[in-house]
Image (cartoon, rainbow, N blue to C red):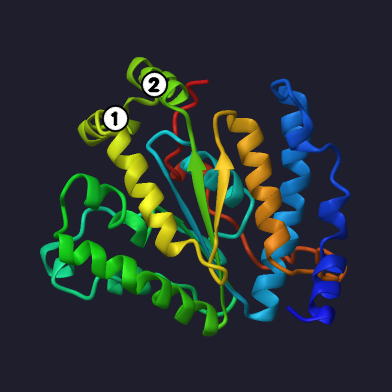
């Protein structure tokens, strides 16, 4: 990176650096008040960033990987919460169709890459092949090793095309994962989050650890590094991840024109009687 670009990036993130508190320096659990105060500040910066991405025609891809119940969905929800869904969208692909299984492996992911002025958040990504497909034997040995050899080149092509690619791995301990699984099992609002596949994956903890280490050895490159998020503390993980994401995308605050609401012109129009409309019953 050139000296000028470094200087530009630093100036672009003054507001990020001024956010109160050093999240990682806190040894105790974050209070709800502190967490929501900091999240509000980060949301303001996320809106500024996504305005800049749209205005400048930037293309941003963010990958979220990690074990089941590591907190990927939670941070994605907080990132996307205040943003325009036409600018920032989430891609969470299901099991490939029979037709997709015969395509070039990266093809169905490439179909969801951003156009100018878009941000795409992948809730799991092409790294399925190095994780669940490897451990659960959903792919062949040849397919697996071909992926590890091809993936760095694929990501290098994306970056050279002008896409900003950021990869996060959410790291969670077995004790914390067990607690979150039990919460999902016992909470009717979270029951849908756990599947038979999650339970089977839990029995293969070591195999997943080995697969992750092998994946990192091939795909944690200088041009496309992995950023590991310590996710045992959900609140801290969310704040740290969003803060880091903002630091990796050079942006500035756009100056918006002052908006004045025009008066409503009601001349010559008579509304139909309200009694002719069907209203939702007022139960509350």
Task: Provide residue 140's location: percent of width, then percent of height.
Answer: 14, 60
Which label belongs to residue 178?
2
The secondary element bearing badge 2 is classed as helix
Residue 190 visible in the current orientation? yes
Determine whether, in the image, residue 197 is placed left or right of residue 38.
left
Q: Say left or right for 98 vs 133.
A: left
> Is disc 1 placed on a helix, strand or loop?
helix
**Does 163 sit above or below residue 207?**
below
Question: In which quadrant of the rendered view does residue 185 lie?
Answer: top left
Mark 1, residue position: 202
Residue under the point 69% across and 21% down: 29
Instruction: Name the one closer to the observer, 66 or 143.
Output: 143
Residue 17, percent from left and from top = 85, 52
The answer to whether residue 91 is seen in the rendering is no
Q: Quadrant of residue 26?
A: top right
Q: Quadrant of the N terminus?
A: bottom right
Point out residue 278 in the picture as x, y percentages from the top left corner. 42, 41
Seen in the picture, residue 148 relative to 275 is either above or below; the reply is below
Q: Residue at x 16, y 49 (%)?
A: 137
Which residue, as the protein is rendered here, is positioned at the far left? 98
The residue under the point 13% across, 72% down is: 102
Is the C-beta separation of discs 1 and 2 under 8 Å?
A: yes
Q: Is residue 266 left or right of residue 105?
A: right
Q: Which mark is residue 40?
A: none
């Amino acid at each position: 990176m050139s000296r000028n670009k470094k200087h530009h990036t630093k100036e672009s993130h003054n507001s990020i650096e001024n956010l109160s508190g050093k999240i990682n320096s806190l040894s105790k659990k974050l209070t709800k008040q502190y967490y929501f105060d900091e999240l509000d500040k980060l949301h303001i910066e996320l809106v500024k960033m996504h305005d800049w991405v749209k205005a400048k025609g930037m293309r941003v891809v963010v990958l979220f990987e990690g074990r089941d119940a590591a907190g990927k969905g939670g941070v994605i929800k907080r990132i996307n919460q205040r943003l325009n869904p036409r600018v920032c969208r989430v891609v969470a692909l299901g099991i490939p169709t029979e037709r997709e299984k015969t395509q070039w492996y990266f093809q169905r992911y490439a179909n969801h890459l951003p156009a100018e002025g878009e941000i795409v958040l992948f809730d799991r990504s092409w790294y399925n092949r190095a994780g669940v497909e490897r451990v659960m034997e959903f792919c062949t040995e040849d397919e697996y090793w071909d992926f590890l050899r091809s993936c760095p080149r694929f990501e290098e092509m994306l970056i050279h095309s002008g896409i900003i690619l950021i990869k996060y791995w959410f790291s969670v301990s077995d004790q914390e994962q067990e607690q979150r699984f039990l919460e999902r099992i016992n909470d009717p609002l979270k029951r849908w989050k756990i599947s038979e596949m999650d339970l089977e994956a839990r029995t293969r903890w070591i195999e997943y650890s080995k697969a992750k280490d092998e994946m990192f050895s091939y795909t944690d490159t200088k041009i496309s590094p992995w950023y590991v998020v310590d996710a045992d503390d959900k609140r801290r993980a969310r704040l740290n991840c969003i803060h880091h994401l903002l630091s990796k995308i050079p942006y500035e605050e756009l100056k918006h024109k002052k908006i004045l609401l025009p008066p409503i012109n009601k001349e010559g129009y008579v509304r139909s009687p309200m009694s002719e409309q069907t209203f939702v019953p007022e139960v509350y």
